[in-house]
Image (cartoon, rainbow, N blue to C red):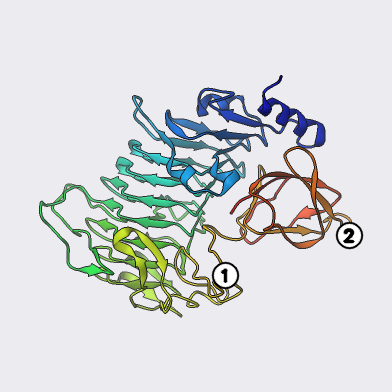
Amino acid sequence: MRPMHLLLAAALCAALAAPASARIIHVPDSVATIRAAISAAHSGDTVLADTGIYEERIELRGHGVTVASRFLLTGDRSFITNTVIQPGASPGTVVSFFEAGDSTDVLAGFTIRNGSGTNGGGIHCWGGSALIRDNIIEDNFTTADGGGVMIQFGAKPTVVGNVIRRNRTNIWGGGVYVHDGCSPVVERNVIYDNGAITDRPAGFTGPGTCCGRVLGPGATAGGYDCRGGGVLVTNYTGAPMAPIVVNNTIDGNEAQASGGGIYVNHAPADVRNNIVTASAPAGVHTDGPELTIAYNDAWGNGTNISGSTREGQGSISACPMYADSAGDDFHLQAGSPCIDAGDPASPPDPDSTRADMGAFWFFQTGAAEPGSPVVTPASRAATIVWGVLHLGVDSKQNTECGAELLDAGGRRVMTLAPGANDVSRLSPGIYFLKDEGGRLKDEPGSRKAVRKVIVAR
């Protein structure tokens, strides 16, 4: 009898005219390593890793490949913590995206840890438009920049729904570093306990506490001008860029010099709907031209706002009322001033109320809260949805055409109509769109979508 994964791949090929070669490559059952599976994959394929610790460094090169743990199929977050990629005996960056233009690969549902290098200890984006979602990026280190995530060479990744914690750098950007000319979307991440710092005096406890969490040590005697403990955005060259930092919870980060939470240097960053707390020496710091930030809560930092940062409309400074920050639970409690306090122009929360600040929605209807946004920007390799799938009209004929959604075995599970389609009743998994002339609607900031659809919780 043929193995189940081969039967599944054969069913996919028979059922779908495009992409005819779409496969799920199982690691380690079909291929021993993630790296080898990526080498064997083609555009539209999914490399699906079982639980375990993979001691390897992987590279994605813009071929439209999805690399994921079983979290992608189940929505069970335990698969994130139990599916680990780390360098092992070969030190260096754990995951590198060598992409060009709008080429897009997907990384979802892993713990990425113990990376090291000069730039980009956990993840390094060398151009392209990767989708990096629902990962834990922790305990990585660089001697220069970007301890957790380094975004460089004009890259436009979407970094969404990740936990980025305990990453360190000797110079700039402990958690996330956005380099000149890059236009990422950094959205709904929890970024905490990262540092751009070289020396930590013994016994130093910091200037205060926020919601029970001790602030970082702030400025210390070290050899470098370390900046941007949580997120750093810079643009020395003045290259065109449009970075978006929205709806993140940024807590307990530290920098030796400036910007413990967020540091912006001569860059036109869009900083909205974030909560920045317990960071030192400042929550948000800007060098260069004045930067106005709106609808953020900066509270309990060494200094909340400094440099040429200006608080714009909707800015507050109030305790966000985390559920348990000492236990790293940054959900909001009822009565938090961050509820319904986000930019009213932002998409509403899934309970149809005004956007909240921070990475987590507070559900006012009592419904269970998903871990990620309802709709994430689509890619050429995959459309990943959390409840609503949008189908547009045929752009050439200007006609309303429907489509069929097929499961992995080629069976029709839904007929889609133009507009919004509720797919929340579907089990999490990989589906395919049989196009009858319709086109997936481009959401704001998204890239053109194709036929592979991943439904997650």
Residue 258 place in picture, x, y as percent: 26, 60
In the rendered picture of this protein, how many numbered marks are placed on residues? 2
The amino acid marked with disc number 2 is: Thr
Query: At 33% from the left edge and 75% from the top edge, which residue is drawn?
Result: 319
Whether the residues at callouts 1 and 2 have beta carbons within 8 Å, the answer is: no
98 relative to 194 in the view: left or right: right
234 relative to 377 in the view: left or right: left
The amino acid marked with disc number 1 is: Asp
Give the mark, 1 or 2, whose residue is nearer the N terminus. 1
CA distance separating discs 1 and 2: 31 Å
Task: Please tell me whether mark 1 sits on a helix, a strand or a loop.
Answer: loop
Quadrant where the N terminus sits is top right
Query: At 12% from the left edge and 57% from the top edge, which residue is drawn?
Result: 204
Work out whether residue 130 or residue 423 is closer to the camera in this orientation and state it: 423
Numbered tag placed on residue 446 in the rendering? none
Query: At 11% from the left edge and 52% from the top edge, which residue is drawn?
Result: 201
Residue 198 place in picture, x, y as percent: 20, 47
Q: Name the residue under label 2.
A: 399
Work out whether residue 454 or residue 129 is closer to the camera in this orientation and state it: 454
Q: Which residue of the protein is positioned furthest toward the top in this rendering? A: 1
Label 1 CA crowd tier, 10 Å (few <14, some 14–19, many 20+): some
Work out whether residue 437 or residue 62 is closer to the camera in this orientation and state it: 437
111 relative to 388 in the view: left or right: left
Q: Which residue of the protein is positioned furthest toward the left in this rendering? A: 202
Q: Name the residue under label 1.
A: 349
Q: Which residue of the protein is positioned furthest toward the front in this rendering? A: 1
Label 2 CA crowd tier, 10 Å (few <14, some 14–19, many 20+): few
Residue 20 place in picture, x, y as percent: 77, 32
The image quarter in which residue 140 lies = top left
The answer to whether residue 263 shows anywhere in this view is: no
